[in-house]
Every structure is written in structure tokens, then in C-alpha cells.
Image (spheres, helix red, strand yellow):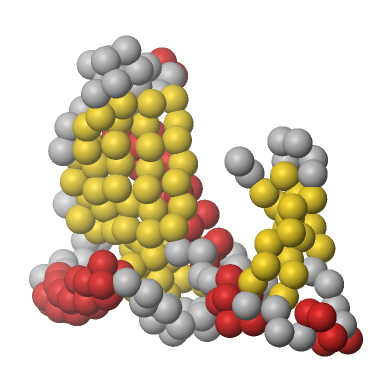
Amino acid sequence: MSFSDDYIPDYKNNFKLKAEYLCYRRCLICRVKLPVWLTPFAYKRLMNKQEKSLTMTVLMTPDMANFSGNVHGGSLLKLLDQVAYACAAKYCKNYVVTAALDQVFFKQNVNVGELVSFYAHVNYVGRSSMEVGVKVFAENLRTHEKRHTTSCYFTMVAVDDDGKAVAVPKLQLESEMEKQLYAAAEMRKKLRQESLEKIRSLHVDVPENGF
């Protein structure tokens, strides 16, 4: 059953609601208001809960196919970028840009006609940057078989209207799993910086007229 926030009474000026908050929610199916009692601590936690995850499911259509009949890697990369963007923007409540993409692993082919689910999660947050991990599963609609096909990590940066980086909320680690994801992302960031320095030292300038 789905619910949407409808009304929150003025608890400060109501004696009966000083101890608890009464939050009304409207059922989208039967259109009936249902009262949900929340303690002040629970209400505050609910309102401050960070939106760190996002799921998107897409049916793979023939226009996404390559010459082999499988879904083109470029089509998947476009969807991956869209999911990472939406996840990061939802978390920081701001526009974001893609700064980096690494460790893209295409484990298995994705076939036309399969239902593909993208699971994105904010693993790490810096001052203005966020690492978003995306895991992809393809489902055969006839056999219901699910396969883990792709994994990758995006670095997204929050920007203002002028394109300048802006600060994002500090990540709240609420579970042991999130702490492990954060530690792993922190290590990837360090390795990424070390790798970038080595690549820069190997850089060779190619003239405009080519070789």
C-alpha cells in the first residue's frame, strides 16, 4: 500500500500533541486518511532521513541492440549515467555533473527483451563529490532467471547555476554495511588519485596534425 504525506498539525500549540506528533497520511488506493503516531525523536529522524538509494527498471528494446543482437554497451552506459545522476541529485537535492567513471565491469551480455534493474547507492561523500555505486541485474521474463550483469562506480559533483562546485550534506552511516561501503569507497578514491598521478607522468603530447 502506498502513502503520501498530507498534513502535519501544529503540535506546539496543541496540548494533546506535545508528547507525540500526529502525522496524517492519505492512502492512495482507498483515499482514506490514516493517523500515524510518531514520537518527536521518530518524527525528526523520519524528516531528516537521507535518500541514499535509487532503483530504476528498464525493458531492453530492439533499438538498443548491437550487430550481435545483444544490448549495446553504450546504451547501458547511458542508462548507468542517468541512474547515478538521479541518485546523487536526489541525495544532495542539487544539480550534479559526472566527474569520473571507473571500474565498469560487464560481467555478462544483456539480451533484448530482458527486464534490467539498476540499483544505485551513495557510498561516499566528500565536500562536493559523491561516489555512487551501481549494480545491474537482468531478468528473463519467461524463465524469471536473474543475472548480475554489470557493476560500476560514478563520481558525481554537485554544482550551482554557474557550474561551480557546492558543498553537499555529510553522509550518515546508519548500518554496518554502509560503513563498509564507505571504507571501500574511501580506498578507491585514494587508489584513483594515485593512478591519476602515474598516468599523468606517462602522458605524451600528440601534435594536432597527428603522427
Rendered residue at 79%/40% (across/down): 31
Rendered residue at 26%/67% (across/down): 177
Rendered residue at 87%/83% (across/down): 14
In the rendered view, tell whether residue 147 sits above or below residue 204: above
Outermost residue to the front: 16
In the rendered view, tell whether residue 55 sits above or below residue 127: above
Question: Where is residue 25 drawn, in percent x and y?
Answer: 73, 55
In-front residue for pair 180/37: 37
Q: Is there any visible trace of residue 177 in the rendered image?
A: yes
Outermost residue to the right: 13
Question: Where is residue 38 drawn, in percent x and y?
Answer: 64, 71
Rendered residue at 55%/61% (across/down): 90
**Res 149 → quadrant:** top left
Question: Where is residue 192 drawn, in percent x and y?
Answer: 20, 72
In the rendered view, tell whether residue 181 sits above or below residue 83: below
In the rendered view, tell whether residue 119 sits above or below residue 49: above
Residue 30 vs residue 159: left or right?
Answer: right
Quarter of the image with the N terminus is top right
Q: Is there any visible trace of residue 71 in the rendered image?
A: no
**Res 206 → quadrant:** bottom left
